[in-house]
Image (cartoon, grey):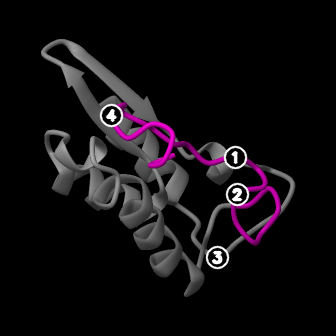
Amino acid sequence: MIEYFPNSIVLPTFGNNDNKYHYLPAFGSYAPAYYTGFFNKFFEKHPTNSKLKDLELIRQTLDNSGYFKVQIAQNLYVISLNTLYFNSRDTYDDVGKEVEQLLWLEE
């Protein structure tokens, strides 16, 4: 992304095949390193994303559960949710992350 879109805002979101657990969010002891690495790759190292407003707030929610809000312009926001927490196919040990995410969205 940096090579081809260095001057564009690139906002990633998680899909069902984006981490080592198919159809599951990163969870347990694997989650902190995964989400921190994701933030580093897509926000800190990207020339345009690294200049976004409220980078620390993006880091907090992304590091917590893989969701974030980005302000693009004065009245324009992009919200990226990690809907893998709502998957009913499997279980994982971070129960409550989906509720936390919805409360954040409501706020």
* Mark 1, other Cα within 10 Å: few <14 / some 14–19 / many ≥20: some
> Residue 57 lies in magenta, yes or no?
no
Q: Please state the extent of the stretch shown in magenta in the rendering.
A: 1-24
Marks 3 and 4, the one that precedes in the sequence = 4
Mark closer to the observer (2, 3): 2
Q: Is residue 56 above or below residue 54?
A: below
User: Which amino acid type is shown beneath numbered disc 3?
Assistant: Asp
User: Which amino acid type is shown beneath numbered disc 4?
Assistant: Asn
**What residue sits right under mark 2 in the picture?**
18
User: Which amino acid type is shown beneath numbered disc 1?
Assistant: Gly
**What residue sits right under mark 4 in the picture?**
7
Q: Secondary structure at mark 4?
A: loop
Mark closer to the observer (4, 1): 4
Marks 1/2 in contact by CB < 8 Å: the verdict is yes
Quarter of the image with the C terminus is top left
Cα gap from disc 2 to disc 3, whole angstroms: 18 Å
Q: Secondary structure at mark 2?
A: loop
Name the residue at the right extreme: 89
Q: Position of residue 53 (x, y in %)?
A: 14, 39
Q: Which mark is residue 15?
A: 1
* Mark 4, other Cα within 10 Å: few <14 / some 14–19 / many ≥20: few
**What residue sits right under mark 3 in the picture?**
93
